[in-house]
Structure formats: structure tokens, C-alpha cells
Amino acid sequence: MRTTLDLPDELIEEAREVVGIRAKRHLVIMALEELIRARRRAALLDMLGNTDFDMTWEEIHRLREDDTEGDADEPIRLMLVPPRHPFVTGEQA
């Protein structure tokens, strides 16, 4: 997508020095990628501790031990599903 941006010269020069990339296009792409990563990381951190999970560590260990016993070819994997978050799902808050 072709876009025209009016960017501060000082900001571009500082980014060039810090990152070591001369091309403005690549600097903007890298900045957008870093912004997206940072926001996704923040959204995941916000979800920590917000799941409804009523098992003790002992019960989890017991489940894991039970998974390795018996005739099953594949052990059952316990997976925690985080609650829905507007940033991750793309919904409006």
C-alpha cells in the first residue's frame, strides 16, 4: 500500500542510528512490527491470572501421571484456554 507520511526528521535520524537501517521504508515497517509485538505481549500479560481454573498442582500432576499409564498411544494434553481479549480477537472494547 502506497502511503505518504510526514515524519519528524530527528526521529528518523535517531531511528537510523539506533537500528542501523538507512531506508525509511524499512524503518517504518520495523517500527510497526515492533509496535504490534509489544501490544500483543501486553495483551497476553493482561490475561495472566484471569482464567477460571480450579485445579491444584497436585491434581495436575496426577493427571499427567495418569496420561502416561494405560494402553493409550497418545497421552491427553491439558491445555488452558485464555479468556477472550478484544486486542487478540479484533473486537471493539
Image (cartoon, grey):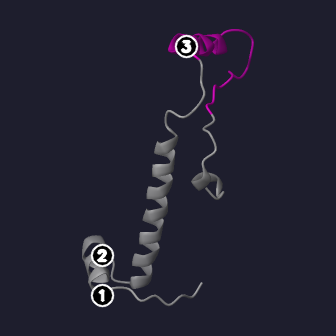
Query: In the rendering, which numbered label is found on residue 9?
Result: 1
Q: Disc 2 vs disc 1: which is toward the camera?
A: 1
Residue at 50% across, 54% down: 40
Along the viewing direction, whichever of 23 and 83 lies nearer the viewer: 83
Classed neighbour count for the residue bearing mark 3: other residues with Cα under 10 Å, few (<14), some (14–19), many (≥20)? few
Above or below, 27 relative to 82: below
Above or below, 80 relative to 22: above
Residue at 66% across, 9% down: 69
Q: Amino acid at mark 3?
A: His
The local secondary structure at tag 1 comes to helix
- Residue 10 in magenta stretch: no
Could you tell me how far apart the alpha carbons at marks 2 and 3 are, in whole angstroms? 49 Å
The local secondary structure at tag 3 comes to helix
Q: Amino acid at mark 1?
A: Asp
Residue bounds of the magenta highlight: 55-80
Q: Earlier in the sequence, mark 2 or mark 3?
A: 2
Q: Amino acid at mark 2?
A: Ala
What residue sits right under mark 3 in the picture? 61
Where on the picture, by quarter, is residue 75? top right
Apparent side of residue 43 relative to residue 31 in the rendered image (left or right): right
- In contact (CB < 8 Å): disc 2 and disc 3: no
Above or below, 26 relative to 41: below
Along the viewing direction, whichever of 24 and 87 lies nearer the viewer: 87
Where on the picture, by quarter, is residue 73? top right
- Residue 73 in magenta stretch: yes
Query: In the rendering, which numbered label is found on residue 15?
Result: 2
Picture mark count:
3
Question: Can you give x and y, in whole percent of width and height, for residue 31 in the image?
Answer: 41, 70
Question: Can you give x and y, in whole percent of width and height, for residue 6 in the image?
Answer: 41, 89
Could you tell me how far apart the alpha carbons at marks 2 and 1 are, in whole angstroms? 10 Å
